[in-house]
Amino acid sequence: MITDLTQGKPSKMLFNLALPMVISILFQQLYNLVDSVIVGRFVGGNALYAIGSSFSYTMVFLAVATGTSAGLTVVAGKFFGSKKYADLKTTISTTFIGMFAVSILFTVLGALLSEPVLRLLGTPDYIIEDAVIYLQIFFYGLTFICIYNVVAGAFAAVGDSKTSLVFLIISSLLNIALDLLFVCVFNMGVAGAAWATLISQAVSAIPALFVLYKRVNKLPSEPSPWFSFRHLRVVVRIAIPSMVQHVIVSLGNMLIQERVNYFSTSNEAIGTAYTAAIKLNTVAINCFVTIGNATSSFTAQNLGAAKPDRVKKGFVAGSLISICVAIPLILIYCFFGDYALQLFLAEGTSENISEILRVGRQFLSIISPFYLIIPVKIVTDGVLRGGECMGQFLVSTFADLFLRVVIAYLLTLFTPLAEVGIWWSWPIGWTISVVISLVFYFRGKWQASGKKNEEPKRQVE
C-alpha cells in the first residue's frame, strides 16, 4: 500500500515502514543461509567455503543494483512527497530501463572473470572448481536481482514495504523447497543451490514488477515519458555515491577474504568458520542497512515536503529501532553462537568441527557487541543520503572501509594475533566511522535539500 510518510507521528510511520523491510531482508538473507546450511550439512565444509569465497566478488556487482535502488528511493521519494507524480513515474521507468541494460553487460562480464578473480584472491585449489560453478550460475540470474532491487527501491519511495515482503516470503519458501530437491534429492551439490536461488529470484522479481506498474499507474498525473535522460542523470547523481559505497565495501571484503584465504592454507577450519560466521554477521548488518534505507525514504519524502524537523525525529526513531534489533542478535551470537554455527556444519565428517566452532565463536564474540554502535552510523548515513549529502556519505563509508582493511593487514602482518587481527578490524573501523557520520549529521547540511529544488523539470514527450 502506497503511504505518505510526511503525515502522522514520525516514529510510528518509520516503524511501520521499516518493520516489513526488516522482515523482507531476513527472508532475503534466507536465500544465502539456506544455500549455506544445506550445502554445509549435505555436501560438506569445503563446499560451504566455496560459496563463501565467492561472496565478496558477487557483492561488487550487487553494489550497482543496491546503489541504484538507493538512488531511486531518494529521487522518487522526493517527487512523491512533493506530489509530482508524473516525474515519479518517469523516474521509475527510466531507472528500470537503465538497470536492465547494465545487468546484461554485468552478466557476461561477471561470468567471464569468475575464475581469474578467484585465483587473484588466492582461493585454495581444493574449492575453486565449486566456487566458479556457483559464481557463473549466480551471474545467469543477476538480471532478476537487479530488477527486484529497482522494484524494492520504488516501493520504498512511495512508502510501501509490505508488497515486497509478500513476494520475498513466497520466493524464500520456494528456494528452500528447490534447495532440498536439487541438493538432497538430485545430488547437484553447489550447482543445485545456485540454481535454486536463481529460480526463486526470478519468481520474486517478475510478478513484483507488474504489481509495481499497476500501483504506480493509478497515481493521478499528466502523461509522462517512459525514459528521460534528465531524470536518469538525477538518479545517477544520487546512485553513484551509493554504488561507490557498496563497491568500496565489497573490495574491502575481497581484501579481507584474501587474508582469510592466506590463513586457511595452514588451517582449513578458518575458511569454513569465517564463511559460517560472516553469514550470521551479514544477517545483522543487513537488518541495520534496511532500517537505514527506510530512514532514507522517510528523509527524502519529508525533505520533498519541506519538513526537516520530522527528519530529526525520524533519525532518533531509526536509531532506537536499530538498537532494539541489535540487542537480541548480540545475545544470540554471544551466548548461543555454537548452535547458530552448527546449522552450517555436518556431523560425522572428517573436518575438525570443534576447531571450526572455536574460530567462528571467536569472530562472533568480538564483533557482535559492537552492533550497538554500527546501527547508529547506518541510520545516520541514511539521513545523509536522503538529504543528498553524497560527499559526506562517501567520506564516512570510505573511512570505515579503509580503516578496516588497513587494520586487518597491520594486525596480521606485524603482530602475533594471526586471524584474530582480522576480526578486530571490524569494531575498530565501526567505532571511528560512527563518529565521522554523527559529525556530518549535526552539521546539518542535509537540511538544505528541503530548501532547494534541484529535480529536473518534467518533460512530457
Image: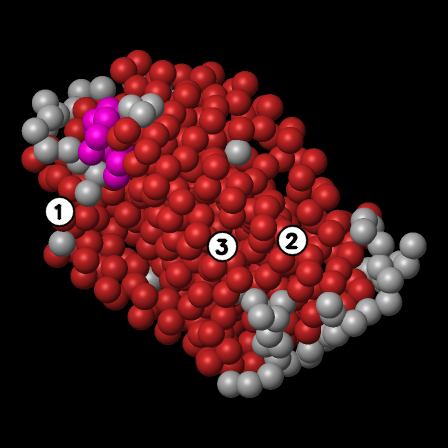
How far apart marks 2 and 1 lie (CA) works out to 43 Å
Residue 374 in the figure: left or right of residue 204: left
Which of the image's four quarters has the C terminus? bottom right
The local crowd at label 3, few if under 14, some if 14 to 19, many if 20 or more residues have their Cα within 10 Å, is: many
Say which element carries label 2.
Answer: helix
- Compared to residue 147, the image places residue 75 above or below, namely below
Residue 152 seen from this side:
yes
Nearest to the observer: residue 212 or residue 116: 212
> x, y percentage for residue 128?
35, 18
Q: Nearer the viewer, mark 2 or mark 1?
A: 2
Q: Amino acid at mark 1?
A: Asp
Read off the magenta span.
37-52
Return the residue nearer the eye: 108 or 1: 1
Left or right, 24 with respect to 64, comes to: left
In terms of sequence position, does the residue under pointer 2 or pointer 3 come before the other?
3
Apparent side of residue 8 relative to residue 454 in the rendered image (left or right): left
Q: Quadrant of the N terminus?
A: bottom right
Residue position for label 2: 210
Q: Assess whether mark 1 and mark 2 are in contact (beta carbons under 8 angstroms).
A: no
**Which numbered disc, 3 or 1, marks the residue that appears first in the sequence?**
3
Q: Residue at x 37, y 37 (%)?
A: 178
Residue at 19% across, 43% down? 343
C-alpha separation, residue under disc 3 versus residue under disc 1: 32 Å
Give percent across and percent down for residue 341.
18, 43
Q: Is residue 41 magenta?
A: yes
Tell me the element at label 1.
Answer: helix
Q: Mark 2 vs mark 1: which is more N-terminal?
A: 2
- Indicate which disc residue 206 carries: none
Look at the image and tell me whether residue 271 can be seen: no
